[in-house]
Structures are given as C-alpha cells and as structure tokens.
C-alpha cells in the first residue's frame, strides 16, 4: 500500500538481539496525511538502509512510502502494524 504525506518525525533507532541470536534495528517515521482532516501515521522501519534513507529526508518533506499493513490477534485483542519496505 502506498502512503503519502509530510514527514513530521523520525524516532531514534533502537537495536538489540532476538532470542534466536539475530541482531535487529528499528525506528518509526511519523507521516501526516493531507486533506481536510490530516491524520498522523506511525510507520515501523526495520532495515538499516531504509532507516538511513528516511533519516536523510527533511522534516516537512512530502514522501511516498510503500508499506505492508498487518493485524494480528493476541488474547482476544487485535494489534496492527504498518511496516515500510520501500521509499519512492
């Protein structure tokens, strides 16, 4: 899914090691959509190259992002995640 909007924030990257011993890194980019009722969308970024690329953008710059949207259930509650896979 393509999400387009103004880049308002990029969080400081976090990193760690999974239970399986794999290193990981992630951050979030906050995008404000256009329109009469703008919405803020937090997008998770899990690839170092994409983190570097989004960090090189200026705050306020309009960006076009290709994302996967996924929801999953845990103990009767649903949780959604938006993950970046490409910056256009």
Image: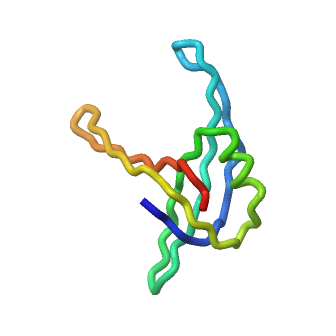
Q: Nearer the viewer, residue 30 or 56?
A: 56
The image position of residue 21, as x and y in percent, is 58, 13
Q: Residue furthest left?
A: 76
Q: Residue at x 61, y 55 (%)?
A: 29
Quadrant that contains the C terminus:
bottom right
User: Residue shown at 67%/60% (left/top)?
Assistant: 9
Front position in the image: 1 or 79: 1
In the displayed structure, 61 sits above or below 51; it is below
Residue 36: x percent and y percent?
46, 86
Query: For this view, does 23 lie left or right of residue 39?
Result: right
Left or right: where 64 falls relative to 36: right
Question: Would you identify the image quadrant in which residue 54 lies?
Answer: bottom right
The residue most toward the bottom is: 36
- x%, y% of residue 16? 65, 24
Residue depicted at 69% across the width and 42% down the height = 49
- In percent of the image, x 68 and y 39: which residue is there? 48
Q: For this rendering, which residue is in front, 85 or 58? A: 85
Furthest residue in direction front, as rendered: 88
The correct choice, above or below, for 19 with respect to 45 in the image is: above
Q: How far across and down, in percent of the image, does residue 80 sit?
A: 37, 47
């Amino acid at each position: 899914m393509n999400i387009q909007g103004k880049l308002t924030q990029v969080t400081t990257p976090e990193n760690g090691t999974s239970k399986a011993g794999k290193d990981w890194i992630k951050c979030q980019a906050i995008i404000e959509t256009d329109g009469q009722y703008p919405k803020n969308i937090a997008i998770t970024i899990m690839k170092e190259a994409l983190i570097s690329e989004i960090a090189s953008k200026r705050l306020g710059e309009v960006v076009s992002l290709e994302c996967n949207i996924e929801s999953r259930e845990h103990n009767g509650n649903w949780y959604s995640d938006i993950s970046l896979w490409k910056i256009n």
